[in-house]
Amino acid sequence: MLNANSPLPHRLLDGGHPLKIGLFGANCSSGRAVTKVPERWSGTWPDNLALVKMADDAGIDFMLPIGRWKGYGGDTGYQEATLETITWACGLLAATKRITVFGTVHAPLFHPVIAAKQMVTADHIGHGRFGLNIVVGWNEGEFEMFGVEQRAHAMRYQYAQDWIDAVKLMWMAPDDVDFDGAFITLKKIRAKPKPYGGTQPVIMNAGASDTGRAFAVKNCDAFFMQASRTSVAETAQRVETVKAEAAAHRRALGVFTVGVITCKPTMKEAEEYHHHCVVDQADWSAVDQLLALRNITPQTVSAEEFTRHRANFAHGNSGVPIIGDPDHVARQLIDLSRVGLNGIAVSFVNYAGELPYFRDEVLPRLERAGLRLPA
């Protein structure tokens, strides 16, 4: 039997389902669908707790939260009510047995000594099932809330390198230790206990730039990349590039993507519900605020490009749209697996309302395809 100091594999990445499936964004009001439909996700603690228990029983691999502090307004107050992700993870881990739960941590906003201790606490609560999603920042309005000025893009990752080096040192060093980095200096750090089972939590990052990808390749166990919305072949090329970069550094890197699922008994029902949620009932004022933060406005891009971005962000705030009956949804997930993706984080308009149908209809099809094990 393993004791508290025995090394454990990363439960999310080593073994288990060939295609990992997680739920993304459930800690936020409205989840990721920028819609006004009344059944949109609440993001409340009772609903999150019920969801994670359902997901754990169904064999869902992980819960991935959004690190959101301010939200985007609009008619719905999109993502304005959110649960802080490390404390959220602690509660979910205490209520479950198998599922990995991530905390999404903005490195510039969390002191590394405090963050390292918080994450170890979560890891012990979950018996090694906590994961770190490290974020370097992007939303200027949120950073202003903290009185923190964002650094230039490349320098953000230089700071994050110091931060993750300091956290890993605290997780590994047996005794008091100093850290002297370019941005962070820490003296006589005492950090006990160490992560559960003698191994650090699984670490992931979703940096979209070349700099962000290089950071993930060097420091992380998993990388979330944007899959192509138009071509499986293009997605395959992106996966191959990331894995080749990791191999050049003699590292194995799990490559994941993000999807938004609308699954109904027929294609017609799925397409009609999708159109109802993200066209007829889209919260367009919130969508426009999201786009403006990325400098995508009618004044900065063409009318055609602005319309395209608007449609993409209404449908799950980015991510691969997967819309159809169970056969179609399963086929799309199988295609993503076949091009080398190790997993996908998905969202629904209402997670708890839609997960049972996905569990009962799509997961068995993935089992028959050899991509999932029985729950």
Image (spheres, rainbow, N blue to C red):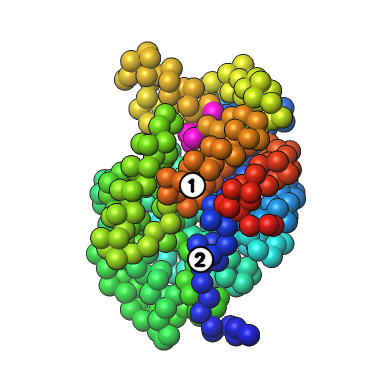
Residue in the foreground of this view, choosing between 237 and 12: 237
Question: Which residue shows up at 29% across the image and 54% down it?
Answer: 244
Q: Secondary structure at mark 2?
A: loop
Question: Which residue shows up at 42% across the image and 49% down it?
Answer: 340
The answer to whether 332 is drawn above or below residue 137 in the figure is: above
Question: Which residue shows up at 48% across the image and 75% down it?
Answer: 199
**Given this view, does label 2 or label 1 mark the residue nearer the observer?**
1
Pointer 2 or 1: first along the chain: 2
In the rendered structure, find residue 14 and report the number of the disc placed on it.
2
Q: Which quadrant holds the C terminus?
A: bottom right
The answer to whether 175 is drawn above or below residue 93 in the figure is: below
Q: Secondary structure at mark 1?
A: helix
Q: Does the image show residue 273?
A: no
Residue in the foreground of this view, choosing between 34 and 97: 97
Residue 147 location, x and y as percent?
40, 48
Q: Which residues are magenta?
A: 315-320
- Residue for badge 1: 337
Question: Which residue shows up at 37% across the image and 36% down it?
Answer: 233
Q: Is residue 91 left or right of residue 183?
A: right
Residue 211 location, x and y as percent?
27, 49
Residue 205 location, x and y as percent?
41, 53
- Label 2 Cα crowd, 10 Å radius (few <14 / some 14-19 / many 20+): few
Q: Is residue 357 left or right of residue 138?
A: right
Magenta residues: mostly which secondary structure?
A: loop
Kindly identify the amino acid type of the residue bearing the numbered disc 1: Ser
Q: Which quadrant holds the N terminus?
A: bottom right
In magenta segment, residue 319: yes
The answer to whether 123 is drawn above or below residue 55 in the figure is: below
Kindly identify the amino acid type of the residue bearing the numbered disc 2: Asp
Q: Does the image show residue 243?
A: yes
The answer to whether 120 is drawn above or below residue 75 in the figure is: below
